[in-house]
Each structure stands twice: as C-alpha cells, then as structure tokens.
Image (tube, rainbow, N blue to C red):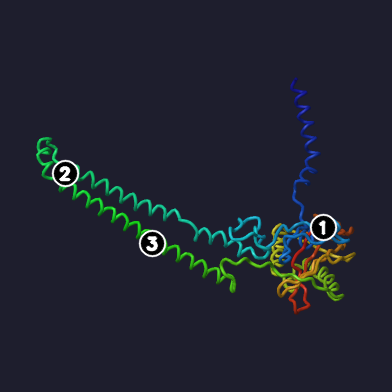
Amino acid sequence: MNRTTFNSRTLLCLLSFTLVAPSMLVDLIPQAEARAGRGSSMGSRGSRTFSAPSYTRSSPSGAQPMQRTMTRPPAAATSAPSSNSGMSGAAPGMAGGAMNRPVQQQQSGGMSNFTKGLVGGAIGAAGYHMLAGSKESNAQQPSNPDQQGQNTQQQAPQRQGGGFMTFVTRLIMIGLVIWLVMRFIRRRRAASNMANTMSAGRMNPGMSAGAQPQPTQQTNIQLQQDDYIAFQQRLTEVQDAWTRQDLGSLQKITTPEMLAYFNEQLTDLASRGLHNSVSNVQFIQGDLSEAWGEGNREYATVAMRYSLIDVTTDNTGRVVEGNPNQPENIAELWTFVRAANNNWWLLSAIQQAN
C-alpha cells in the first residue's frame, strides 16, 4: 500500500466519523425526564406499597413496581423463621418487630464466644496449676539415687498422704472456679434477657417479647363523586405547581415524601440549567383500582390517562426536549391518602403503567 492510498483511506474514515458522530453523541447524551415525577414510579401506598395495584381499563397491564419509596420492605424475605412460630416473616408494615426477633434469640440463647473462652481459660489454668504442682513435687525430690533410696522409706507415707491431700485440694479449687464462672454466666444471661424483654415492651407497648406482630388491618371503603373530582383537580394542580416550581403549593397537596422527591427533581433540573414546563393538561379517562382504609388513614389508587404538552428548555429558552405543538398521552396510577375524618386528599405515590 503506497502513502497516497493510505492518506486517502484515512481521510475517508475521518469524514465518515464526522458525519456519524453527531447522531451518536445525541443518543449518548442523557435526555431530561419531564413532567411531575419525571416518568418514574415512587412514593408509598401504605401496607400495599410492595403489592401491585389491581388492573383497570385504563391500566390493563398493571403498574410498574416502586423504584423509590421510604416504606420499609416486608421482612419475610430477610428474616429467618423463628423456632417458636410457623410464620416465615411479618406482614407488611411490621418489619421492625420481625427483625428484632433473631437478635433477641442470638443474645439470649446459647453461650457466647466470650463465655466459652472464659470457661476454657479457667479450666485450662486450673489444669496447668495441677501439672505444675505435680512437676514441682517431682523436682523437689533429691537427684542422688543413693540418697533417694535412703529417704524413700522414710518419706513414702508422708508423700502419699501429702500428695492425696494436694490432689483433693486442687480438685476443690477447680470446682470452685468453674462454679464461679457458671454463676457469672447465668447472671449475665438473666440480665440480657431482662433487657431484651424491656426493650421489646417499649417498642411494642402491650405486646410481649415473644408475641407475633399483627398484620395491618385493612378495610375496603366507598368513594363519592366528590372524591373523583378531587383526584382530577390534584392532577392539574400538581402539574401546574411543578411548572411554576412552587414547593409551597406542592406541600399542600402532596405527602412529605412526594414533596421531597419533587424538590430533588426540580433541583436536579435547575443545576443543569434546565426548566420543565407542562401545559394544556387534559384528563381523558380514569378508573378506580383500589380504595381501602388502614388505621386512621384511607388510601385510593386511581389509574388515569391524560394528555399534556411537555417541554424542557435551557436557560436561553431553547427547547432541548419535547414538542410545544404536540401533546403527549400519559398513563399513570396515582395513589392518594387522607385522614379517615378528613376529605383532603394528598398525592402519596405515582406509578407508571406497564
């Protein structure tokens, strides 16, 4: 290959890369997610956070699982079954009590490594002293065979009596040491059991340390027409406050968890010099997926289809994502929560439809 051919091919490769590179770089640049929630599944649905909502006409394929939530997952998959119970784990919402059980059994049952070491050390020390005493008595005997033979008859009864008494004395000393060690172990174990029982009583008033946590009581509830109107209003109110970056308005219509997520997302957009604007929100269709009560709260999960114009711009006003003239159709499941004696619904979760 001559130099002219090599330079021609090199120039052709560089030209081809120049033509293809812009499209490749556009694909590699992460696109800014838009609208409130930025197309993710996040929030909490009470004890049903980790269970799939029921299917509806608006979401015939169900919803995606939560990607972000402050609700602790159920302990069934992480805690080992207790020997005193046939249940493999706690019900959702009672993870704290179930996770404490293996810890209590580990502290109160069996002998710890420290205790085993203490007992072994005491017994070993006593055995060492016995052997050392035995060697000492042998070392004190005269090394001259003639002298040893002369003194053997005189000191034999003495050695037999003294050796026997020394052996008994050392056995008594060993037994006393072992008794003291075992007494210390029993007291330590009793104090540990009492501390665990008192701690369990403080965490679960009215429930003993060995009692199983009760599952969250759930009851189906009936919604009124005003509730469905409130859900549609929340849809437009959340999107409007998101566009205005009005955290004060979002605080009135969302849970603290959802407010924290929205604040984080808005901060992330602002740090990159971007602003997301949502307009012309039109509700298309909605179906109730679930409505239930647990404790002093009531929940409702609603599948909603709606359209909007979703545009992201940079600090110069240039559109970097979205079409200001083309509405987008969205399918999501929104979960709302309220106090049982109140009619004010708060947005507590958003899940994307499959």
Quadrant assignment for the N terminus: top right
Q: Measured from the top left, where is residue 121 in percent x and y?
A: 35, 51
Of mark 1 and mark 3, the one earlier in the sequence is 1
143 up-or-down from 50: above or below: above
Q: Nearer the viewer, mark 2 or mark 1?
A: 2
> Is residue 69 at least partly visible in the picture?
yes
- Residue 82 marker: none
100 or 166, which is in the foreground? 166
SS at badge 2: loop
Q: Which residue is mark 3?
A: 184
SS at badge 3: helix
Q: Amino acid at mark 1?
A: Gly
Q: Amino acid at mark 2?
A: Gln
Q: Amino acid at mark 3?
A: Phe
Q: Say which residue appears at 75% left-offset and 60% top-offset.
A: 51
Q: Measured from the top left, where is residue 18 in percent x and y?
A: 78, 38
Q: Measured from the top left, where is residue 55 in percent x and y?
A: 84, 60
Separation of disc 1 and disc 3 at Cα? 60 Å
Q: Nearer the viewer, mark 1 or mark 3?
A: 3
- Residue 62 marker: 1
Residue 88 falls in image quadrant: bottom right
Q: Which residue is mark 2?
A: 140
Q: Is residue 335 left or right of residue 187?
A: right
Q: Are marks 1 and 3 in contact (CB under 8 Å)?
A: no
Separation of disc 3 and disc 2 at Cα? 38 Å
Q: Is residue 6 left or right of residue 85?
A: right
Q: Is residue 40 left or right of residue 172?
A: right
Residue 22 falls in image quadrant: top right
Of mark 3 and mark 2, the one earlier in the sequence is 2
Q: Are marks 2 and 1 in contact (CB under 8 Å)?
A: no
SS at badge 1: loop
